[in-house]
Amino acid sequence: MPMIQTRRRFLSTLLLAGVAGLSDALHLPAAAETLETTTVRLVNDGSICIAPLFAAEELLRAEGFADIRFVPIPADRQVKAVADGKLDFALWKPYL
């Protein structure tokens, strides 16, 4: 039985071929490479907005971060905490 080529099948095949070609060209760093630092300090201000950080914890561990700390700092002091070296990343909320 002959297979009918649809637009959807053609575009998905084209997309997969493009992604396969890009994966070699981009050379993303592997998790097996040694990191310069294995500690990262993320903010924990108690809001629901930091839920993606908790979800990213396992991904960071897979990338080689062994010590992931959630530092409790209020939202209005996060930018200063990064400047003072108490945090590595912060969630800046300009509406506060």
Image (cartoon, rainbow, N blue to C red):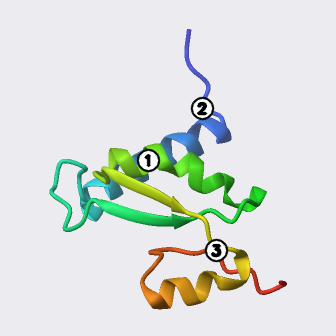
Percent across and percent down for residue 15 are 50, 49
**Image quarter hosting the N terminus:** top right
Q: Residue at x 65, y 84 (%)?
A: 77
- Examine the rendered structure and indicate whether residue 83 appears above or below residue 66: below
Label at residue 91: 3
In the picture of the structure, the residue carrying the numbered disc 1 is 59
Image depth: mark 2 or mark 1 in front: 1
Q: Earlier in the sequence, mark 2 or mark 3?
A: 2
* Dot 1 amino acid type: Leu
* Front-lying residue, 29 or 36: 36
Find residue 75 and report its horizontal and vertical position in percent. 71, 76
Which residue is disc 2 drawn over? 5
Q: Nearer the viewer, residue 29 or 79?
A: 79
User: What distance separates the C-alpha of mark 3 from that of mark 1?
Assistant: 18 Å
Does label 3 or label 1 sit earlier along the sequence? 1
Q: Does residue 18 appear left or right of residue 79 in this picture?
A: left
Circle 1 — which element?
helix
